[in-house]
Image: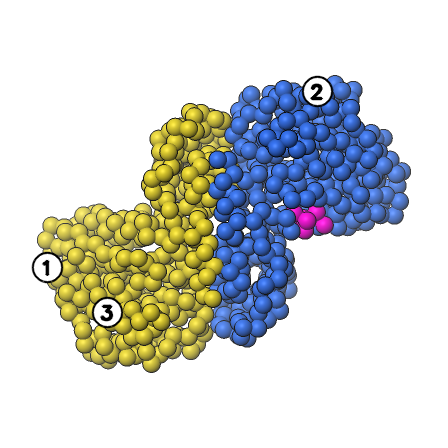
Chain colours: A yellow, B blue
Amino acid sequence: MTVTTPRGFRAGGVAAGLKASGRPDVALVVNDGPSDVAAAVFTANRCKANPVLWSEQVMADRRARAVVLNSGGANCYTGPQGFQTTHASAELVAGKLGIGAVDVVVCSTGLIGEQLDRAALTSGIDAVTERLSGSGGEAAAEAIMTTDTRSKQVVRQGSGFAIGGMAKGAGMLAPALATMLVVITTDAEIDADTAEGALRAATRATFDRLDSDGCMSTNDTVLLMASGASGTSPEAGEFTALLTEVCHDLAQQLLGDAEGAEHDITIEVRNAATEDDALAVGRAVARSNLFKTAVYGKDPNWGRILAAAGTTEAAFDPGALDVAFNGVWICRDGAPGDSRDKVDLSARAVEVTVDLKAGTESATIWTNDLTVAYVHENSAYST
Amino acid sequence: MTVTTPRGFRAGGVAAGLKASGRPDVALVVNDGPSDVAAAVFTANRCKANPVLWSEQVMADRRARAVVLNSGGANCYTGPQGFQTTHASAELVAGKLGIGAVDVVVCSTGLIGEQLDRAALTSGIDAVTERLSGSGGEAAAEAIMTTDTRSKQVVRQGSGFAIGGMAKGAGMLAPALATMLVVITTDAEIDADTAEGALRAATRATFDRLDSDGCMSTNDTVLLMASGASGTSPEAGEFTALLTEVCHDLAQQLLGDAEGAEHDITIEVRNAATEDDALAVGRAVARSNLFKTAVYGKDPNWGRILAAAGTTEAAFDPGALDVAFNGVWICRDGAPGDSRDKVDLSARAVEVTVDLKAGTESATIWTNDLTVAYVHENSAYST
């Protein structure tokens, strides 16, 4: 149940020695068509990694035949030499598959600021092209893992077509490891406009609302490839809805596997004047270290939520805010409400609700708590 | 060497039982004139504590005769009842001193979302008004401490006048404790415009550039009171320069006593197109949990600095950035430069320099590392 479940795709994963652990670290996913429509969303960070700089060019024509991914190094802030490594790997894949390098997306994840071992990467690409198969999705998903404790895969069936996906890490959940990488495949027959519109809508409501530590990765890539092999052409709305389900499922898998986290926190902001206001308040709360440490301490500290909301421009009356933890409204009208003692934060899932009483719009942001383990993992990563 | 060093001021501090520890928790500083010129800067957080809401009204006429401060409770998000407590304490001080309540600034610090014990506060105010003296600044500075490990005081002498100050906390360094409170006194004879202009200029270059955890407190207050008792009227420029020195000294004392911090980090952003650009990059770096955990781990992780810079709109070429740790330029032109091994982050002071190569402006932001102790202290605070 992975990227090779939809028809028209082969994939594989191998260990090339990029990871010191010797675990699999090079993956390849190939779209055998008949269509080569693709869409991608990249990190909004201005300081982008070389594979993102390359892949943005590849995606200019909204077509792609393959994506090669490596863990064990982000190839980020590695200058012209690093860009040449990315380019060479695309050329190598293209030569093996008999396609053009401009149809090969490249993704990398791992340490920033170090050159990738080009010889190891080359041998990995040689090996993985020999291992491509219609059941190789699982191996590919394993080869992109960094500190992930498990591979992340999903499939959803539509009417006569399917969408599959795999993801790694991290992303804004733990960008120490540089990246959230997502590859989504479908055998639906869709045009480039449909693919792009659907992917933007789906990511906006899912991955874009994961906000674990407020940091924006340098390598984030979400790629959708459509083979058309089902011969089924769904309506754009139907396709977008199913794609959003796929992205939501992967996003929740990422959230549940965030480094060092002990709580998965859902922040719903209700009754905002605009959706942007709801998002602004949700993100401000999600980025408050004080709020996040409080949840780690199982402390329903609603004052820190109001303090975070107060840093935004969103429309609301500070004296009217209500806040609930797990359904208990412990802040009403900006002052103490029901007893804090009714709130139990011992479970992993924590639901925070903020009622702005300023309109009818709402939005949800997902984040994690800030833990001692987060500090340990991210302080020890490159040393 | 404190707020009672300049002529015309009395102060005191007492233990009123607001703190469970029994330590001093109520302070009073009185300006005996002849002048009652004052200026204040309050938190920009929209969700303000009751003492801030009150004190903003007091300061509307840019005059104040006294400031009463308490630790042991922030009186924040405590609704109309909390505002009445603030108002009552100002009335009580005013009655004791024979002045108007509208001339009494109120500051509170401690836990958010709980009512202050009004009886304890009342008895504390009764007691502190009996203890006022021209040498009471030290006692006042101790009574405003929360998790501060030492009181923070300073005096600077000008030509014929002096400026003294005391501070607590915290502020953006550890807003768990709700607040940075700063009281500055001077016996210079200045008008309200000079006082306000000087205070805004001084705080902009000092307290506003402390950014320890990106959180904005609900109670932050910086108050300047001018007695005119020296009879000396300095030029505005001379007064502003000395006031900036006082604020800088207090800011550095706050930085050096931040909760849980193991490193004091100075981030200098050079060669920016505008000062705002330099500040934006400096703040983005200071707020990156990944950067801050890396410093805790003594890891000169320049990639996380570039990733933080890349989230801003500041003018720069990502491929041209240089970054130094303690003067070692380990990133040049957005790629690895000198060896990381030359960087030693074992000392408490860490200097980061970012060269944007986009202009001639510069700015400095001060922050701390993100440590296990920070997480412990802020997760355990209210439970």
Left-right relation of A63 to B57: left
Q: Which of marks 1 and 2 is in front?
A: 2
Q: Which is nearer the eye, A347 or B178? A: A347
Numbered mark located on residue A13 in the image: 3
Q: Which residue is drawn at 62% across and 38% down?
A: B146
Residue contact at pointers 3 and 1, CB within 8 angstroms: no
Gap between marks 2 and 3 measured at Cα: 75 Å
In this rendering, does residue A289 appear at all? yes
* Above/below status of B268 relative to B27: below
Q: Where is residue A80 in the image (x, y as percent from the top left)?
A: 43, 76
Numbered mark located on residue A231 in the image: 1
Q: Residues within 10 Å of mark 3 (few under 14, many from 20)?
A: many
The type of residue carrying mark 3 is Gly
Q: Where is residue A320 in the image (x, y as percent from the top left)?
A: 47, 27
Secondary structure beneath disc 3?
Answer: strand
In this rendering, does residue B103 appear at all? no
Magenta segment, prevailing SS (helix, strand or loop): helix
What subunit carries mark 3?
A
Q: Position of residue B220 (x, y in %)?
A: 62, 38
| Residue labelled with disc 2 | B92
Stretch of the chain drawn in magenta: B249-254
